Image (cartoon, rainbow, N blue to C red):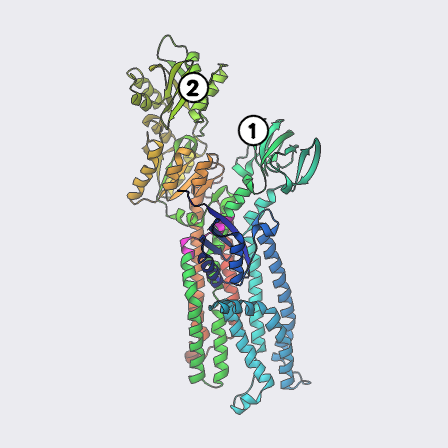
Amino acid sequence: MTATKISKTTIPIDGMSCASCVARVEEGLRQRSGVTAASVNFATEQALIEFIASQITLRDLETTITELGYTPHLPEDSGDQNPFERNLKSQQTRLQSLTTRLMVATSLAIPIFVLNLAEIPSLTTQQGYLLQFLLATPIQFWAGWQFYHGAWVAGKHKTTDMNTLIAMGTSAAYGYSMITTFLPSTFVTADITPSVYFDTAAAIILLILIGRSLEARAKGKTSESITKLLGLQPRQARVIRKGEEHNIPVETVRVGDIVIVRPGEKIPVDGTIEEGTSTVDESMLTGESFPVDKQPGDEVIGATINQTGSFLFLAKRVGKNTALAHIVQLIQDAQGSKPPIAKLVDTVSSYFVPIVFGIAVLTFSLWWSIGPEPAITLAILNLVAVLIIACPCALGLATPTSIMVGIGKGAEYGILIRASEALEQARTLTTVVFDKTGTLTTGIMAVQDTIPLDADWEPNHILFYAGSAEKWSEHPLSKAIVLEAKRREITLESPKEFLASSGLGIKAIVRTKQVHVGNIQYFKSMGFDITNVQPKVIELSKHGLTTMCIAVNNKPVGLLSVSDSVKDNAAKAISGLQDTGLEVVMLTGDNQYTATAVANSVGIAQVISEVLPEQKSEVIKQLQHEGKIVAMVGDGINDAPAIAQANIGMAIGTGTDVAIETADITLIGGDLRSVITAITLSRATLRNIKQNLFWAFAYNITLIPIAAGILYPLWGILLNPIFAAGAMAMSSVSVVSNALRLRRFRPPMAL
């Protein structure tokens, strides 16, 4: 049975104004057949959608979003290399439009306020009202058109949102004033002194536009991390086509092009050096400050900086397939995803607006029926105040803005967080489990000694058979043996009938002889006589050396002691984790003695050794069954099952693609201090989100009753709708501003 292929896309969306819009788009997408998951982010203004391509197309998704009343921008329609660029341009266009409407509304509102506050002898009262009407109408229906449009869209789908609240509130004030202007006798007959509130309606729209403008500017700052990454990409590339050199836009470089890079230039795309040597600054990718020597056959990464020499390289990954584009996409997807705390907020928001309408209707009814004169006027003003002050913008922004900034800060420090769930859950970790080779150690293995077990076998003879048998293996220990043979200028031969036993050893035929290379457990499993082997292995292991045993035609003939060095700052990272109260464990397939020696050197007390790759995930399960919340940090293919099983999987960025694709968090540079940074960042981000939610809820819980007039019976205090609009606008700005404080986050240990 063929597995169903799930596709993923990110679609920027224009027209969303609050958390209710987010809920409507999400629900509409999820109801479509073929959509398996949909997450809409108000702060990033984009939808992250997973779907079955054989059942639904991108055009179908576009149609669904359009029918919901919003404007989607499919990636291929935008003409940009990355959807983020399209979204950024859309934000800039929207900000320009907001600024224009704000300027016009301000120029019209000022004379309205003057007419309301000052008596002008040359104008009668009704003439003043008429002039205010003429000035207020463009503000109401042009500057405030977006609120009517949003309310109409929501109404078509039998729902409400913040646009509905604003449209109804300002329309009530504007409509009451228009009746006063053109039908004053209506109020005179009812013995009510007529008055107008054009200034209230205009001020509300003006203040909300100011708030949205400030909010848009602040939201733009939350995307700075991606903007900086995209800025690393060079604009031009120098390629050789048909024997001639051409300067072309980097977007037009094709796989297979030969690209020229000179000293001081940025490498435009990913590829492999064909000719020339140089050193390359890869700090933007790895975080390592030292340049890396490059020669023919070596890989180069786009956006890194060539330093000393010129070279030609073959383009292998271009456009959205480059390492830089992949990193940007990971950050975007993570920023667009939702942690559990955000889903709770969405649920609350879905009930919030209908409750507010109920409170507003009750407020109007009570003031009209039992309020003091002029009852109708006070009823309308308090209705407007409740509708305006309750707009749930702050709730919609409280979580996604903090998530965006938090994930962006992680990227700045070489920490790629694949989903916001990981950012939220990292703060709850109790146990961090480390693989040894390539994680705590450099993973660069080197043969330290060759020890014959038989007088007839010389060290080079042993290395010939071991190196030939291991020639095609990708294991770090195998590479160390082959490298040592080459260093001694031993010519190796290709093995026959190569067979590997994962985590134990290999068997091969070399020159008609059967050769086994593996650890002591492998030799035990093969039934070899290890009487003279085991004591030597134990002694070498006590010194932190990994020992490979070599047997030819089922007879042990020699030992190779191999070791790698512990990473710089590994001990500091372990100490830092322990200082925060976390339990640290080493989990390795290496023998007990070697594992203990390495653990002691970095300060880890709990060691689980001699574990086969398929058993590592079982160890993680056992720790979880003990009630521990576990992070697994590893780098190899054999770590992938354990990384997947852990509550939070962390992969070393210098490790295998399988481990990285499985992980929730990737530490690009391989610096283990990044583990502490990721956990600390998680705690800081969730603390920031809770602050935002507290103030957002506190704002509504406190001010809605005040807007309804609860303080009037005691102290005669009513909340002017103008102040309600200002408070609503500032609540959104304050939430975004608080989230932006995360930009000041610094790692607890300098990276």
Q: CA distance from mark 2 to mark 1?
A: 28 Å
Residue 252, located in which quarter of the rendered image?
top right
Q: Label 2: how many residues lie within 10 Å, few (<14), some (14-19) or many (20+)?
A: some
Residue 87, x across and y down, in percent: 57, 53
Count neighbours of disc 1 (C-alpha within 10 A) and say few if under 14, some if 14 to 19, many if 20 or more.
few
| Residue drawn at 56 percent across, 75 percent down | 200
Q: Looking at numbered disc 1 in the image, what kind of residue is underneath it?
A: Asp
Q: Position of residue 682 (x, y in %)?
A: 43, 48
- Label number found at residue 284: none
Most distant residue in the right direction:
244
Nearer the camera: disc 2 or disc 1:
2
Task: Inspect the magenta stretch and tell me whether residue 659 lies in it.
Answer: no
The answer to whether 631 is drawn above or below residue 536 in the figure is below
The image quadrant that residue 601 belongs to is: top left
User: Is 336 inside the magenta-drawn segment?
Assistant: yes
Rendered position, 200 above or below 313: below
Is residue 277 rendered to the left or right of residue 679? Answer: right
Element class at badge 2: strand
Identify the magenta region: 332-342
Q: Residue furthest top?
A: 456
Which element is circle 1 on?
loop
- Which of these two is toward me, 174 or 48? 48
Give the vertical position of 511 relative to 619 (above or below).
above
The quarter of the rendered structure image containing the N terminus is: top left
Residue at horizontal 49 percent and vertical 85 percent from the top: 374
Labelled disc at residue 298:
1
Q: Earlier in the sequence, mark 2 or mark 1?
A: 1
> What amino acid type should be assigned to the residue bearing mark 2?
Lys
- The prevailing secondary structure element of the residues shown in magenta is helix
Q: Which residue is mark 2?
A: 496
Residue toward you, 382 or 142 = 142
In the rendered image, residue 530, in percent from the top left (x then y), is placed at 29, 17
